[in-house]
């Protein structure tokens, strides 16, 4: 491909100097030297930009041969090539730059300063690089003149001329294409934009670290910044300082609106700006006339509101459930708008964020999933009941400090726990009336080759709804549910949902709810369970093993149950990490050639703020006692909630009533009889061919300008969005504040954190559900 040469101002400048030697050969000989006089030293600052491009350049000044600089006598010797060194660049005609020397000084030989006299006679053997009117070239004249210059349209006001000198000194103008400049007017705004193209960002950089900014913006850039602060932003760097700038930033008025917008998009890059904003006092309240939107820039207002909300949520904890719901709706009127403020994205409005989820609980928990049978209740739970549990998890995960967590937990005990208790009590009532949950082990058709069963310990139904959406990048996903075994513990439930369940049974002698292998009655421990799978043609894959995709497999990954037992309420905050592991493992297997997946689980769980209430069951009645279930002795009388073990009905299992526990102090528990513990999800995934989404996006074009990324796609579909992630399938690895919807196939997004520069990532295209439909590797800022 032929390289296109772009004529820059520097190239035209050098060309103009060299063309000074063009003379009428019929009456003149070739000049021996080109003299470049510059009485006002207008061009002196650009010399470093010319040294390499104009090797024949010699400069009048202090003796420094390595920089091709010296006094008049040295210059004359260099032109004559008597110094033994080729200072005149071979056959090229030497160019002598004369800073501080006017053409007339050399013309008047008798009065010529002594130090210049060796050069005076060169005017007769050489030529001057000058305008057609014999005047020295100025930068403005060279740009505007149509006779020997560039003929550009340059404004002649003082501001533009000052800007010209600044950009000339800073060296940011010489590389511009002359052709591009021909089509525009060159004014102060354009020139200042070359030197400092983003004044709003400059203000934030200075606010973030004024000392560092001052050290980096020496000379012209600093002068321009100070001038812009006065003219555009209405404050004086030295007289007003950072606090005044922070006050104006918080007000978001006039030119500061653009600064605020940039800060909102990239606050991570300016971590110290918030410290200044924290010192800003908001304007005095006008009472009923206050507009909440006007207070959005004041961190102090947000912090006071968070403190008030903390107090209000603690007060809700002492209310009856109906009163608590009404109170939450009233509190939302005062605080809900703060979730749209920048402080919420910065994580400084955690209680306001949690409040949004509490409002959802208050709206949905007015009634329990009703029905006269367990199956009817399950239908209602799948419709909307799971959303209450999901909102509770989100409310817990929205806060981190102890004070905030205590306030949210108080509100949850007033709103969520009564709903949880009422739902559990009704579910237990209808299950007692039915006498069982299921008629036996779930039956499924034989799996085809290429199928992999993925077992996740403790995948609750509401959490599975989130996982279903995340698996959209792997294939076509569907979610159903079934009943786990009684009791809802791993030893029983894992065998219950396995593909070899029909080869498993139970005996009265089995302990700790662990069934056995039919036929030889060996306990179904890990070794025997894996052996049983292998005997029936199912590969057991550990960690990152991919096995033979032409067969069948059993994989275990994710461990929500272990994490819940170990960390209690913290499970809600770390669910994304746990689910991310499941998605990554599924993608790994799909990429290896496995064509379909069934994700199953053994049980769900209860997560109760303030801990599960304790219920008594005397020790002499039980053989084994866990938190939510116990094996009764043969001599014991059954409790109101006693059922036969699903693997052996002769074994009697006592269940804790409601959401109580036989063991005090648990926040997390399972093994009992509730929808949350017993209704287990089943996720089916049919992998996309070659692990690509069905919705096709043919091409992606990615262009980086610093930390801003322009993305263009060739797709007619609407509702597509772009994200940038370090891991393509994991939404939590995004480096953007939020995804951006494509408009006519184009989208522009900004990476907020400067530390992401040069990091390997993926540009991913998402469909309306958030599933990844295309991805492209990139390097941020490349």
Image (spheres, grey):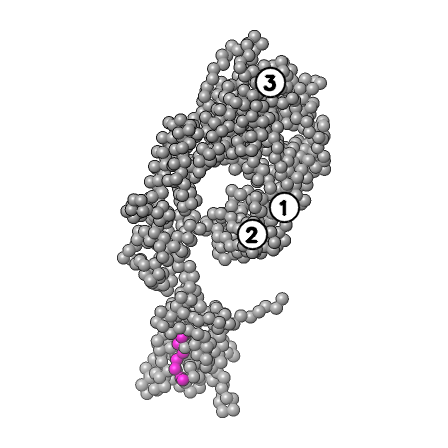
Mark 1 and mark 2 in contact (Cβ < 8 Å)?
no
Q: Main secondary structure of the magenta part?
A: loop
Which percent across, then down, holds residue 625? Answer: 53, 16
The residue where tag 2 is placed is 778
Name the residue located 47 percent from the left edge and 78 percent from the top edge. Answer: 16
Crowd rating for badge 3 (residues with CA inside 10 Å; few <14, some 14–19, many 20+): few
Q: 248 or 64, which is in the foreground?
A: 248
Q: Is residue 49 left or right of residue 500?
A: left
Which of the pair 91/338 is nearer the observer? 338
**Residue displayed at 34% across by 83% down:** 105
Magenta stretch: includes residue 136: yes
Q: Position of residue 680 (x, y in %)?
A: 59, 29
Q: CA distance from mark 3 to mark 2?
A: 59 Å
Classify mark 1: residues with Cα within 10 Å, few (<14), some (14-19) or many (20+): many
Was residue 436 drawn as part of the magenta stretch in this picture?
no
Q: Which residues are magenta?
A: 133-140
Q: At x 49% / y 29%, what residue is drawn?
A: 367
Distance between mark 2 and mark 1 Cα atoms: 20 Å
């Amino acid at each position: 491909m032929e390289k296109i040469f772009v004529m820059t101002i520097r190239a035209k400048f050098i060309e103009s100097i060299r063309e000074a030697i063009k003379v009428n050969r019929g009456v003149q000989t070739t000049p021996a030297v080109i003299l470049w006089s510059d009485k006002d030293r207008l061009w002196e600052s650009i010399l470093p930009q010319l040294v390499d491009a104009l090797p024949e350049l010699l400069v009048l000044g202090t003796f420094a041969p390595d920089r091709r600089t010296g006094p008049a006598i040295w210059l004359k010797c260099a032109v004559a090539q008597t110094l033994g060194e080729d200072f005149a660049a071979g056959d090229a005609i030497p160019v002598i730059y004369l800073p501080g020397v006017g053409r007339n000084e050399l013309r008047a030989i008798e009065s010529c300063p002594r130090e210049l006299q060796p050069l005076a006679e060169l005017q007769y053997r050489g030529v001057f690089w000058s305008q057609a009117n014999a005047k020295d070239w100025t930068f403005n004249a060279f740009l505007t003149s149509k006779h020997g210059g560039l003929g550009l349209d340059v404004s002649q006001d003082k501001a533009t001329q000052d800007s010209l000198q600044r950009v000339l000194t800073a060296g940011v103008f010489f590389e511009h294409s002359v052709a591009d400049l021909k089509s525009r007017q060159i004014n102060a705004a354009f020139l200042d934009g070359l030197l400092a193209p983003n004044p709003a960002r400059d203000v934030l950089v200075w606010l973030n670290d004024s000392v560092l900014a001052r050290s980096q913006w020496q000379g012209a850039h600093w002068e321009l910044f100070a001038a812009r602060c006065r003219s555009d932003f209405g404050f004086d760097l030295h007289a007003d300082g950072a606090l005044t700038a922070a006050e104006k930033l918080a007000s978001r008025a006039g030119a500061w609106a653009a600064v605020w917008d940039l800060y909102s998009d990239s606050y991570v890059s300016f971590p110290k700006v918030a410290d200044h904003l924290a010192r800003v006092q908001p304007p005095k309240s006008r009472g009923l006339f206050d507009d909440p939107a006007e207070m959005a820039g004041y961190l102090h207002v947000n912090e006071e509101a968070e403190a008030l909300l903390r107090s209000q949520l603690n007060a809700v904890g002492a209310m009856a459930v109906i009163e608590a719901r009404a109170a939450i709706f009233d509190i939302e009127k005062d605080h809900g708008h703060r979730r749209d403020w920048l402080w919420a994205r910065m994580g400084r409005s955690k209680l306001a964020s949690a409040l949004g989820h509490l409002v959802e609980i208050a709206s949905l928990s007015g009634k329990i999933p009703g029905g006269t049978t367990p199956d009817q209740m399950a239908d209602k739970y799948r419709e909307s009941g799971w959303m209450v549990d999901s909102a509770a998890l989100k409310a817990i995960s929205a806060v981190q400090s102890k004070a905030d967590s205590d306030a949210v937990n108080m509100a949850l005990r007033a709103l969520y726990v009564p709903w949880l208790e009422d739902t559990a009590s009704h579910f237990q009532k209808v299950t007692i009336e039915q006498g069982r949950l299921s008629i036996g082990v779930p039956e499924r058709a034989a799996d085809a080759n290429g199928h992999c069963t993925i077992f996740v310990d403790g995948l609750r139904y509401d959490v599975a709804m989130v996982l279903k959406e995340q698996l959209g990048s792997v294939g076509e996903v569907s979610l159903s549910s079934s009943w786990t075994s009684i009791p809802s513990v791993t030893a029983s439930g894992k065998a219950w949902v396995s593909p070899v369940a029909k080869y498993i049974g139970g005996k009265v002698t089995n302990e700790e709810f662990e069934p056995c292998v039919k036929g030889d009655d060996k306990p179904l421990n890990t070794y025997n369970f894996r052996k049983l799978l292998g005997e029936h043609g199912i590969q057991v894959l550990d960690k990152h093993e991919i096995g033979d995709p032409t067969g069948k497999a059993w994989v275990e990954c994710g461990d929500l149950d272990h994490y819940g037992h170990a960390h209690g309420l913290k499970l809600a905050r770390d669910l994304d990490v746990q689910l991310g592991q499941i998605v990554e493992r599924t993608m790994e297997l799909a990429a290896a050639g496995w064509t379909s997946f069934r994700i199953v689980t053994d049980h769900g769980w209860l997560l109760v703020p303030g801990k599960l209430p304790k219920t008594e069951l005397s020790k002499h009645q039980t053989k084994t006692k866990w938190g939510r279930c116990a094996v009764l002795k043969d001599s014991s009388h059954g409790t109101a909630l006693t059922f036969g073990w699903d693997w052996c009905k002769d074994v009697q299992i006592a269940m804790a009533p409601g959401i109580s526990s036989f063991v005090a102090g648990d926040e997390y528990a399972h093994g009992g009889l509730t929808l949350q513990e017993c209704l287990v999800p089943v996720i089916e995934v049919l992998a996309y061919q070659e692990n690509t989404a069905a919705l096709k996006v043919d091409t992606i074009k990615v262009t980086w300008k610093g930390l801003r990324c322009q993305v263009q796609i060739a797709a007619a579909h609407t509702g597509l969005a772009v994200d940038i992630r370090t891991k393509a399938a994991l939404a939590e690895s995004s480096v953007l504040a939020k995804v951006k919807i494509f408009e006519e196939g184009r989208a522009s997004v900004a990476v907020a954190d400067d530390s992401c520069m040069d990091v390997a990532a993926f540009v991913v295209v998402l469909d309306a559900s958030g599933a990844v439909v295309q991805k492209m590797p990139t390097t941020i800022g490349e």
